[in-house]
Amino acid sequence: MTRSNATAELIDPAAVATTTPTPGPLRLSRARFAAEPTKATRRIILTVVGVVFIVPILAMVEFSLRVGQPVNNVQAYGFTHYLAIFDPANNQAYSNLFQGIGNSLGICAITVAIVLVLLLPTMIFVELKFPKLRRVLEFICIIPVTIPSIVLVVGFVPVYSIVAQIFGSYPWTMAFAVGIIVLPYAYRPIAANLAAVEVVVLSEAGRSLGAGWGSVLMRVILPNLRRGILASCFITIAVVLGEYTIASFLSQNTFQTALLLVQHTDPYVAVIFAVLALVFAFVLLLLIGRLGSLRPGGTRLTRRSA
Amino acid sequence: MTVSTRTAATKTAADLAQREGATVELLNVVKDYAGHRALTGVNLSMAPGEFISLLGPSGCGKTTVLRALSGLETITEGRILIDGSDVAQVPVNKRDIGMVFQAYSLFPHLTVQQNVEFGLRMRKVDAASRRTRAQDALDMVGLGHLGERYAHQLSGGQQQRVALARALVTRPRVLLLDEPLSALDAKVRVQLRDEIRRIQTDLGITTLFVTHDQEEALAVSDRVAVMREGNIEQVGTPEDLYTQPATSFVATFVGLSNPVAAELAGETVTAFGMSLPLLGTGPRDGAVTAYIRPEDITLSSAESATGIPATVVVSSFLGSLRRTQVRLDDGTLLFVQHDVRVRPLTGDRVMLELAGRPVAVSVRE
Amino acid sequence: MTVATPLASATTSGAGRPSRRRSVVWLGLVPFAAYVLLFLAIPAVLAVGSGFFDNTGNVTLANLAAFANPQILQHFWNSIWISAVTAVIGAIIGALVCFALLGTKSDSFLRTTVDSASSVLAQFGGIMLAFAFIATIGAQGIITKWLVSIGLVQNVFNNFDSKGVLLYQVVGLLIPYLYFQVPLMVITFMPAMEGLKSTWAEANATLGGTRATFWWRIGMPILAPAFFGSLILLFANSFSSYATAAALISSQAVITPLDIKQQLTSETVVGVSNTAGVLALGMVIVMIVLMTGYSALQRRASRWQR
């Protein structure tokens, strides 16, 4: 083994650059060992798949813009069908659809209430007082994935005959069933938020500083769960608006059942509302995604340099 | 590289050493990322078998140097020579280097044995030779009995040993270690760094070791290169860096030192009314900052005409010595290192004496 | 992320409290428990158990003869092979998309758009996706018309197997099903893809491997459990899907979910009672098998993510 006997090489401090000079030209050789795909591969795959997946949506838009049958193989386009929605003469024909939308919104409100009033408090409660039950709660919220709605409805039909005797057969009663279907989706964001925020430690800190449970809940826990709660609500809304199976089996008039019905008489309006609903759900979820990357104070998460 | 057929009993690292370490040279290496220059012209020469640590704070570029040498990063300007040939255009997998990462580098789906054999498999070594060489490498790091385990069944220290065996089994020309001990417990860290040093010495492999822990760097290296903001401030043996720091940064980064206001005239530094010899070469005469090591100050309770009066702020017991922080009458805080039998209490009035050893200085800003 | 991926909970357990107040505290769980009992447990038991009762309320195994009915069996088989095909193809395409997204920042515009779009299409499409495909490859669909206009008057979409429009046949279900299977794969598989640590690729490179050896020896073996887990999830998703098929094929039942609908509304094509319950039981058994396999694979996958 050789040992270097070089004496300390002293560097004149003044010679050490104190300002960062402007960077020189970058050598563009791409690292060929990483798992990531090359730019070309990435672009090709995403473009092909993207195009294939946007076509049906565009087809719906194209369909909704058609006016009349093609004359000499040329199709005329216009906003006739869009304007027809607002035409009072059509109110009768579309009344079922509008009623369905109204019912769906009502069911939305009640389902969101179930999530906020039943699921959320229970999740917080379990997290604070019964941590061993966390797995049980998670399992319960996963059951609706294993027992899908097409199976559950077989059981909902007899249960709802009793519900109808108590509450009447109003559409809003459907919210109880839909709330169960929504459980897996609503559970995830809140659970992720709870895990990220260390609710137990925070509430212990709050209590040690003299706060009662009420204060801890309102001032410490809930403000930190805003992201998860909001995401949960948005997903619930999207799920409720897209729900068809239960409404169909319980013979209720909701957005989706009405869409299917109106499609037979006026496919154009059905397609228009379908596109609008898809875009609406897309925007809702996009907002959730954006929420996820924001910290309180509004600054975006940046990567810390090593 | 000779391929050897071996019997199963050999366990010493010396048997694995079949070649001289390589020389490594970094010449004016510059590395730019979009918008910022990470390395501003790094120069470093490594002799065969030498163990050099790159030491510096976060963001100083030490990891960039290591990755440039490995080929995981490309460089913008400059040359990298291993055994005299420029490897800047050679891709990572052909550079014949061994690398140990900070954490999470073992392949989780393979056993320890399979992990270690991986590099040999890439070099198309036959199965029987692979097995024996991997076993020898594992014996060398003391884990010969854990070949059938998986990474998640091992402790952090064991995982890093496996990573070391995996890197060394192919007998690379250069060994690169990227803060391999940072993620480990303190005791394991000390144990493992000595083992790495021992194995490296036995194998005679040229080694570059990146760390932010100066105690670690000083303990195991032949030479240490202190880096700051993209360049090397000083390269030297640990003793040289400690006793003859070239810049104020090195003086404060390596070991503890007290910066005090002083005057430089020729070869004499005047601090606290005392004359001290200048260490190394100094800047122009005038106002300077002198760096006095805590062990070069003595503490006593006795009154003295030449002493510097001070009040004890806090005293820490460190096992084999005591470190006491004192405040001078003008408010300056100093650290003093002394025998454990002297036990100052907070608020005590004490007298400080300078031992008179040479001090390094830098221009006072 | 907006869908079911198992959580690794890392929160500390709450401090142990003397059990004197426990009995009162348990009351906090009652509302949620009651809700789940009434609207999940009871319907589930009814759905799955009703197959064991005949019309007079006596326990019987005779209803299980429903599975001997050739039509029922055929539809069950349809459900299975459609699910299998769409799961495999969807998994492969979805994995390719995940690969293409590797290396992009998770809060980039591209990623949030893909995530949101995938969530919408995978989970909330249902009826609306049926409309989308009617507009694309239905009798008057944009692609069908384009094929006609370039001379293929009788093409694969408007006259498949001499039985008419492809979309309204069993085989035609494959296309809209793939449309929600691929996004579901992207959602469930992306976390696994992102879990590939960069140090593995770098270690592979420093040990002399190429990108090919990385994927063959490291990347794919590590991703295999997650891939097959997601594939099972896709199978389960397709198997339990109802709305899209109901919208496209309303005249007859071709898959088990449609059978359940038919049995609940029009009764005894089969000759035994409570056929819907029997079918529900069959579906649940399949789902339980699938979800057990899924969670086993998830556990294996997460072991390596540590």
Image: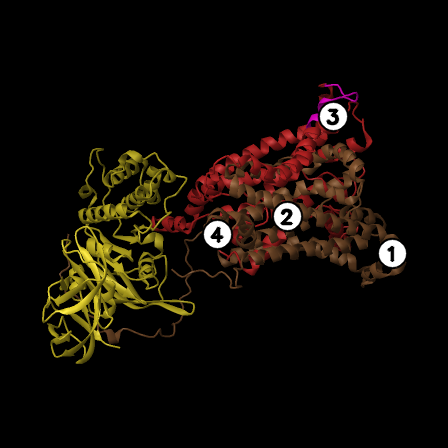
Chain colours: A brown, B yellow, C red
The amino acid at mark 3 is Pro
The amino acid at mark 4 is Gly
Residue B215 in picture, x, y percent from top left? 23, 56
Residue C226 in picture, x, y percent from top left? 51, 41
- Residues shaded magenta: C48-59
Q: Name the residue: 25% across, 52% down.
A: B173
Q: Are marks 2 and 4 in contact (CB under 8 Å)?
A: no
Q: Nearer the viewer, mark 1 or mark 4?
A: 4
* Badge 3 element: helix
The amino acid at mark 2 is Leu
Q: Residue under circle 2?
A: A116
Q: Give the CA separation, mark 1 to mark 4.
A: 60 Å
Q: Decide which of tag 2 and tag 4 comes sooner along the chain.
A: 2
Q: Chain of mark 2?
A: A
Q: Is residue A84 inside the magenta stretch?
A: no
Q: Decide which of tag 1 and tag 4 comes sooner along the chain.
A: 1
Q: Are marks 2 and 3 on the same chain?
A: no
Q: Give the CA separation, mark 1 to mark 2.
A: 36 Å
Q: Nearer the viewer, mark 1 or mark 2?
A: 2
Q: Name the residue: 13% across, 53% down.
A: B341
Q: Are marks 1 and 4 in contact (CB under 8 Å)?
A: no
Indicate left or right for B77 with A151 as reference.
left
Number of labels in the image equals: 4
Residue A209 seen in the current view: yes
Q: Give the CA separation, mark 2 to mark 4.
A: 27 Å
Q: Are marks 2 and 3 in contact (CB under 8 Å)?
A: no
Q: Residue under circle 1?
A: A91
Q: Chain of mark 3?
A: C
Q: Are marks 3 and 4 on the same chain?
A: no
